[in-house]
Amino acid sequence: MTPFREFEAFAPYPNITLESDRVHPFLQGSAKDALWAASRQVPLEDGTPMLITSAFRTIADQYVLWRSAQAGGCADAARPGASNHQFGLAIDIDNRSVWHQPLVDAGCVWLGAGDPVHYDCPGEPKPEDAIIAFQRLWNLNHPDEPLEDDGAYGPATEAALRRTPLSGFAVDGCTTCEQRCDGDFLIIPDCRRLPCTTGCTEERFEAQCVDTPQPEYIDPWLRNRIEENANVTYPPPKRIKAPSRRVREAVLDEGCAATGRGSSWLTFGFIALLLRRRVR
């Protein structure tokens, strides 16, 4: 899964005013840069700051507008997951007569008479981001009823949106948790509760499901030595010359003492054996 787009705050900034605190002042970086460039084209002395009535919208914001439009309560709104407001690329403004040309010159595109307040600014649409964010947030709070975080706005995701509390979720998705066991569930750092089919354990390095293969412990010093020597090439063993046949026969011949030279050959044989052992 590709990373989420990072949004940047575009307000407060000179010549930009938000209609109310319900406006989320966030856009993709490229869209924010275009908005700021447009705001600098009209002198502050004119006293007509750009009045922004909508910018970034969550999937919940878009759902409410879309359902209202379906019921005939307000202007047309795109389906959740299909609006550039959710991607951090769109703004709605109230005083278009002053700011239309500066916005167009900065690279923003007017949507037209069908939605005269709407401008799409430069950036890359990623329709799945807003949906995945909601799906993961839902899963954090409903581990027993998980949604597939596939970025698709299907019937299951829409049904979950309808059940979302107006006051928000208990787990916000921004808090980090200590990895631990909670009965047969594993709590992981992003606070999700993952079911463990055969139980959860905290006996070893960190809490984990017991059906997860445990890493084999290797002493750190030994691990370092193994890694250091992994690519070492050793020279082939030296070829050692064996004692001559005469020496071997002298050492092994039980009757060597009868020759009168047996003691000297026996001594020589022992010396040869000792030298061979030292070479090894």
Image (cartoon, rainbow, N blue to C red):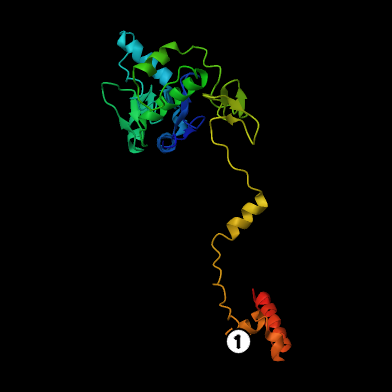
Q: Is residue 5 left or right of residue 268?
A: left
Which image quadrant for residue 193? top right
Please tell me which residue lies in front, 126 or 238.
238
The number of callouts visible is: 1
Vertical placement of 10 versus 139: above or below?
below
Above or below, 173 against 73 in this view is below
Which residue lies at the image location 36% right of the left edge and 29% below the top edge?
Answer: 127
Instruction: Please say whether residue 97 is visible from this viewpoint.
Output: no
Q: Which residue is mark 1?
A: 246
Residue 117 x/y as whole percent: 34, 23
Query: In the displayed image of the protein, which residue is found farthest to the bottom?
Result: 260
**Residue 231 appears in which quarter of the rendering?**
bottom right
Residue 129 position in % (x across, y down): 41, 30
Relative to 27, say whether 271 is above or below: below
| Camera-side residue of 234 and 51 | 234
Question: Which quadrant would residue 35 be assigned to in this image?
Answer: top left
Local secondary structure at mark 1:
helix
Determine the residue positioned at 42% across, 18% down: 61
Tell me the quadrant of the picture where the N terminus can be found. Answer: top left
The kind of residue tagged 1 is Arg
- Image position, residue 145 (x, y; %): 45, 17
Looking at the picture, tell me which residue is in the foreground, 104 or 132.
Answer: 132
What x and y, as percent, mark residue 108? 34, 34
Check the image and report above or below for 191 versus 215.
above
Examine the rendering and report whether any part of residue 113 can be seen. Answer: yes
Residue at 68% from the left image edge and 76% from the top image edge: 278
- Picture quarter with the C terminus: bottom right
Could you say which is closer to the camera, residue 42 or residue 267? 267
